[in-house]
């Protein structure tokens, strides 16, 4: 399993619109092959910042499956115009023996 992590900085004052758009966008990602689950968390200290966590079966499920799908274009239309700057997306795996 691979965890996708992105810190999303939203343009000032557009958090409510972003959250509304995300409600639709999450339906797109959750229907993707290899998707397991996701969480969107808002930062307590910086209210226009969010943490997006998405669990995938594999790195390829995200990078090749979702990002190269026609549905990804709709995801982009819904969300990408809110970001400033555009987020860096990284992927993580569990360190054997280091998790509970």
Image: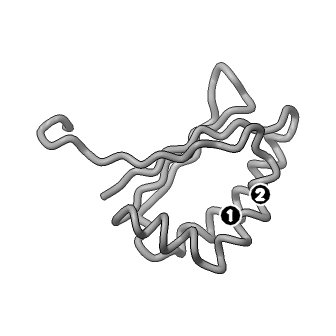
Using the image, determine if residue 68 lies above or below residue 23.
below
Which of the labelled discs sits on residue 75, or is there none?
Answer: none
What residue appears at the point 70 percent right and 65 percent down from the top-left corner?
A: 75
Residue ranking furthest to the top: 45
Q: Quadrant of the C terminus?
A: top left
What residue is disc 2 on? 21
What residue is disc 1 on? 25
Location of residue 61 in the rendering, given as x and y in whole percent from the top left corner? 42, 69
Q: Nearer the viewer, residue 98 or 15?
A: 98
Cα gap from disc 1 to disc 2, whole angstroms: 6 Å
What SS does tag 1 mark?
A: helix
What SS does tag 2 mark?
A: helix
Residue ranking furthest to the left: 97
Location of residue 68 in the rendering, given as x and y in whole percent from the top left corner? 57, 74
The crowding category of the residue bearing disc 1, from other C-alpha atoms within 10 Å (few below 14, some 14 to 19, many at least 20), is many
Using the image, determine if residue 98 lies above or below residue 92.
above
Q: Nearer the viewer, residue 63 or 39?
A: 63
The crowding category of the residue bearing disc 2, from other C-alpha atoms within 10 Å (few below 14, some 14 to 19, many at least 20), is some
What residue appears at the point 82 percent right and 37 percent down from the top-left corner?
A: 11
User: Would residue 5 be found to the left or right of residue 46 on screen?
Assistant: left
What residue appears at the point 62 percent right and 29 percent down from the top-left corner?
A: 43
Location of residue 20 in the rendering, given as x and y in whole percent from the top left corner? 78, 54
Residue 7 figure quarter: top right
Residue ranking furthest to the right: 13
Residue 46 figure quarter: top right
Location of residue 54 in the rendering, given as x and y in whole percent from the top left corner? 48, 54
Q: Quadrant of the N terminus?
A: bottom left
Q: How is the image coloured?
A: one colour
Using the image, determine if residue 75 lies above or below residue 99.
below
Q: Are marks 1 and 2 in contact (CB under 8 Å)?
A: yes
User: Would residue 16 be found to the left or right of residue 90 on screen?
Assistant: right
User: Would residue 42 be found to the left or right of residue 74 on screen?
Assistant: left
């Amino acid at each position: 399993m691979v965890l996708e992590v992105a810190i999303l900085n939203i343009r000032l004052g557009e958090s409510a619109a972003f959250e509304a758009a995300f409600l639709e966008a999450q339906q797109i990602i959750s229907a993707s092959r290899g998707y397991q689950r996701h969480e969107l968390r808002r930062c307590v200290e910086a209210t226009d910042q969010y943490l997006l966590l998405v669990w995938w079966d594999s790195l390829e499920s995200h990078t090749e499956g979702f990002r190269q799908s026609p549905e990804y274009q709709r995801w982009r239309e819904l969300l990408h115009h809110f970001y400033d700057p555009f987020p860096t997306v990284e992927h993580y795996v569990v360190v054997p023996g280091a998790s509970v």
